Structure formats: structure tokens, C-alpha cells
Amino acid sequence: MANFLAKGSPMSDEIPSRNFGTPSVETAPSSRRRLVAITAIAGALLVAVVVLLMILMTRGTSDPVSAPGLSTRPTPGPISSPSDAPLASSAPLANPPPLPSSPPGDAPQALTPSFSSFSAPAEESGCSTGGPSFAPTAPGVKVSWATTGAVEVWFVVGNSDAADSRFMQLPLAGTQDDFPYPGDFGCSRDSVDYTLTLVGAGGEHVHKRWTVINTGDKF
């Protein structure tokens, strides 16, 4: 057999030669394209992650962003007890109903003004025309009073309404010492009339009139 091959048998010339070396691998340009594609995808994912983080930081925890594909079903909160229910508003009504009015007989009545005490002399003997050793004298009015249910007290010489005359206003209780200015007795007359008028809270007028006779000198 060896001799046959060595002698250049025609059979050896007709068998084609084959290369049984290492199999072929991808060329360099194909590997570069794949690397570029992987790098682009990784960059896009990185940009998406940065944008997502910025959105989360902007909205805060109160407005979470749902990632694609994740369930957005809300988490059930704690069950509130009846005591946690909000109470009804206690604000006043815009137009509250009117309160029932009391019968006229139940309304408090204002006190009618009156004199709880009064004192004044009926005579005045202090008038004097004077003489060689002393000057004429004119005594002042002498009176004391106290009132109940009055809001004003007025004094006038004569029998008119003292409150209407507005001559001299006095305290609700006092004496002639409480007069805002002196009130002299009329020594030029035989007698002098005086009036005290009380004014009640409802505007009522109550009078006390008295007469003082001059038993002294007459000017």
C-alpha cells in the first residue's frame, strides 16, 4: 500500500486537500458593534434611573411614583373606631330661631321712685335785718332726703317741676350741704315754697313740696 502511494498513484492526486484547522470566529467589526449597542443600552438605563430619582426627590414621600409594571393598589389604613369619628360642628346657625318671648306679666317692673326719708323745717326764724352791732343775716335752706328707685334728684324754689326747670341737680341722698351752690332762704317774703323732684328709670317724676314760714325779720 505504501509503495502504491509513493509511486504517485493517481488516486492520491484526485483527493482534494481539506483544512482541518481551528473554526472561524467573528470578525472585529461585528464585536465592536455589539459593544456599542450594549454601552448605549446601559447609558439609557442610567439616565432613566437618574430621572426617576429626581422625580422621587421632588415629590417626596407623600406622592410616590409607581414604577411601570408595579401594582398601584392602595394600602388599607387602620380601621377607625367610633370615637375617632369627627364630631358634629358646634358653630352657631346663620339664622338661629327666635327665643320664645316671656309673657308681659313676667317682665321685671322698674321701681317707682320714692322718698325713703325726708325732713325740712316748717319755719325759719334766722332772718335778721341787722342792727347797730350786727349785720343782716339770711339763713340757708334746711332739708335732708333719701330716695329709692330714683336715678335723678332736682331742686327748685317754688312749686314747679324741678326736673323740668333743670335748676339744681342733687345727689340721690343728702342734705343742704350737698347743694352744688348755696340756697338762701327768702327773707323778703312771709313764706317760701320749695320742690324736690325725683326721676325714675322709666322717666317718672315724683315731687315733694313743702312750705317754710318766715318767723324772723322781713327784709
Image (cartoon, grey):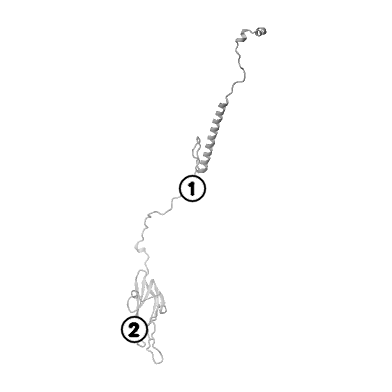
Of the 4 image quadrants, the one containing the N terminus is top right
Identify whether 94 is placed above or below 27. Answer: below
- How packed mark 1 is, by other alpha carbons closer than 10 Å (few <14, some 14-19, many 20 or more), is few
Q: Amino acid at mark 2?
A: Ser
Closer to us: 150 or 140: 140
Closer to us: 101 or 106: 101
Seen from this angle, which residue lies furthest bottom?
132
Q: Is residue 117 left or right of residue 70?
A: left
Closer to us: 94 or 63: 63
Closer to us: 8 or 132: 8
Visible residue check, residue 61:
no
Q: Residue at x 36, y 72 (%)?
A: 199
Picture coordinates of residue 74 (x, y %)? Answer: 49, 40
Identify whether 29 is placed above or below 191. Answer: above
Rounded to the nearest angstrom, the CA distance separating label 2 from label 1 is 88 Å
Quadrant housing residue 36 = top right
Seen from this angle, which residue lies furthest left?
160
Mark 2 or mark 1, earlier in chain? 1
Question: Which disc number belongs to residue 49?
Answer: none
Q: Residue at x 48, y 47 (%)?
A: 84
Quadrant housing residue 113 = bottom left
Secondary structure of residue under mark 1: helix
Picture coordinates of residue 187 (x, y %)? Answer: 35, 85
Secondary structure of residue under mark 2: strand
Q: Amino acid at mark 1?
A: Asp
Identify residue for label 2.
Answer: 191
Picture coordinates of residue 101 (x, y %)? Answer: 36, 60
Of the 4 image quadrants, the one containing the C terminus is bottom left
- How packed mark 2 is, by other alpha carbons closer than 10 Å (few <14, some 14-19, many 20 or more), is some
Identify residue for label 1.
Answer: 84
Marks 2 and 1 close (CB-CB < 8 Å) = no
